[in-house]
Amino acid sequence: MQQGLRAKSRSIREDSEEPRVVRTGALPPFRSARSLVHPVSRVWFELTDTAAFERSIGLAVEWMSQFPKGSGQPRSGVTLPPQAAAGQTFDITDELGANPTKAVRLEADDGVLWAARLDWPDPQVPRTWVSEFFVEARSGHMVRFGAQLTCVRRGDTPPFDTTRPSVVQRVLETLSAEADGRQLTDTVELSEVADVGEIVDLLYANGRRLPVVVISEPEDSQPGFAVQDITRRIAGAAHIVHLSRDASWELTRLVGKRMSVFRGAARLYQPGLSEAGEDPFDHPLWLPQSHREGAVLRQIAGRVLPAAFLDRSNSIFPRYAEVREADARLAMRARGMPPAALAQDELELANRKVAELAEERDLWASLADEQELHRLQAENEVERLKAEVARLEAKANMLEFSLGQRVELEAVTAADDPLESYEDLEDWAEKVLGDAVFIHSAALKDCRKNGHPNMISRIEAALLVMRDHMTPFRRTNDLSHRERAREKLGALGFEDEACFVDRKEAARRPKYSVPHGHETRVLYDHLKYGTGYDNANQVRIYYFWDDEKQQHVVGKMPSHLPNNLTN
């Protein structure tokens, strides 16, 4: 019985007892050269059009036959054979004047897979652009199209922009594409308030494969990013969303200020985003005023386009070499081969495998370098922001001193703005609680979703006690603050207690933990008011102490976590 398509493409690695063979006689001589492989872009998505398999192959072959700007010959170097346009196997590598260009077609009882590769030497500098494509049609599945670009550098070469193969644009313009159940296009329309709910569902979708780049519309007369420039650079490798001003504020209402994007900024939401584990620092934000637009474009493209290389599964992006090898072995199994010829081809196949593994090694080394560069850039940005904060604090202190406006915290408590709604909690906390109490995004979302109007003034009062007495006690160990906190909380009907009689029990229950920075913190303690689970009559404020920042962090509130062991 014929093997399935995926099983065939994996047979090389899994079946060690079968003879190592090739498809048609002796392989051409092996050639190798010392090089450095740099990953540029990898893109793949589903196609829904009729005859999408044949049409996408046609677009890829047409691209191979085109004349690049400033070149007097096609990318392939010579005219491709007729079987190329028919989506069949071909190889013109050894033809005079040809650039290495080849394709292989692998058929099985559940579908067909086509893969191709073209090595185009840059006429100006010592580097070669390697483009790989695949098109897969499996029974019961949508057609998949993929394109990959790497740069093989030999010696010193000038820097280059991170781009996708231009054939991706042609495919998106010509055919209907989608990923993660959402349409992909080469243009982006402005999203309004009514679209934001669907956008939030996409951001937090379990198993989302592609990153999401959200670009907010700037305020009147402010500069913003050129949305179409970003789209032309990365479409197909990411979902791209352009928010109107009102839609930006609706997004902020739904996900919170720290996870939102507004006033002309752009944000990259990485796959794997979840409400329980969100960290705003994992999802880069670019402000239009803080960077030149060209630099932002390069940074976004540099993060989005190579990202798919980190998925090592060949079933996700089948490489030409693997498909060619699987096809050759299957053909030889079907007709047999003399031992002498088999040994010769085994040697050639082994030499090719060494070259392919070396290329893969260089590719992963480059990816590691890229990740290290991103880390260093992030650290530099943190240091820059720390310096800016220090500068602003010094300026504020100087102004405060010169104007004679120094006052004690207790003296200004009465002038605090009231907390009027749960929608305002994040802004209110930043303004009123300052650096004494931080409200975690999980608590903000629970308040917006489940907070009851009956309890808002009581929550406000408890948070002010935390600011005015609980945090100062932890900072100074002044016992008078601890006693004052107990008195004020008691007057409000609150108790400050451990969540469990056995304090360690909280660490064994995932719902009593929240991500904080690059670690997970356990909510061992809580302020509690009332009993039961009805938020109209009870409040739970779960918190922990951040010793590094010297502040209390409210991890969850106001809902009572569903566990009958809690106090």
Image (cartoon, rainbow, N blue to C red):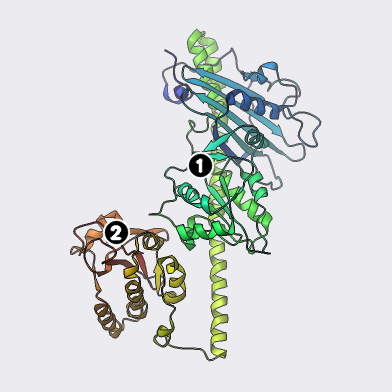
- Where disc 2 sits, the SS reads helix
Percent x, y for residue 498?
Answer: 23, 67
Q: Residue at 45% x, 20% y: name it.
A: 4
Of badges 1 and 2, the one in the foreground is: 2
Q: Which quadrant of the figure contains the C terminus?
A: bottom left
Mark 2 nearby-residue class (10 Å; few <14, some 14–19, many ≥20):
many
Q: Is 520 left, or right, of 351 in this rendering?
A: left
Which residue is situated farthest in the bottom direction here? 404
Count of numbered circles on the image: 2
Q: Secondary structure at mark 1?
A: helix
Three-letter amino acid code at the position of disc 1:
Leu
Q: CA distance from mark 1 to mark 2?
A: 32 Å
Along the line of sight, the residue nearer the viewer: 138 or 540 = 540
Can you give x and y, in whole percent of width and height, for residue 329 in the image?
A: 50, 17
Answer whether labels 1 and 2 touch (C-beta < 8 Å).
no
- Residue situated in front as seen by the camera: 440 or 371: 440
Q: Is residue 191 visible?
A: yes
Q: Which mark is residue 310?
A: 1
Q: Is residue 359 above or below residue 528?
A: above
Q: Which one is nearer the viewer's eye here, 528 or 160?
A: 528
Q: Residue at x 58, y 81 (%)?
A: 395
Q: Is residue 479 left or right of residue 296?
A: left
Checking the image for residue 40, the label placed there is: none
| Res 30 seen here | no
Circle 2 residue: 512
Lower sequence index among marks 1 and 2: 1
Which residue sits at x=25%, y=70%?
529
- Amino acid under disc 2: Tyr
Quadrant in which the N terminus appears: top left
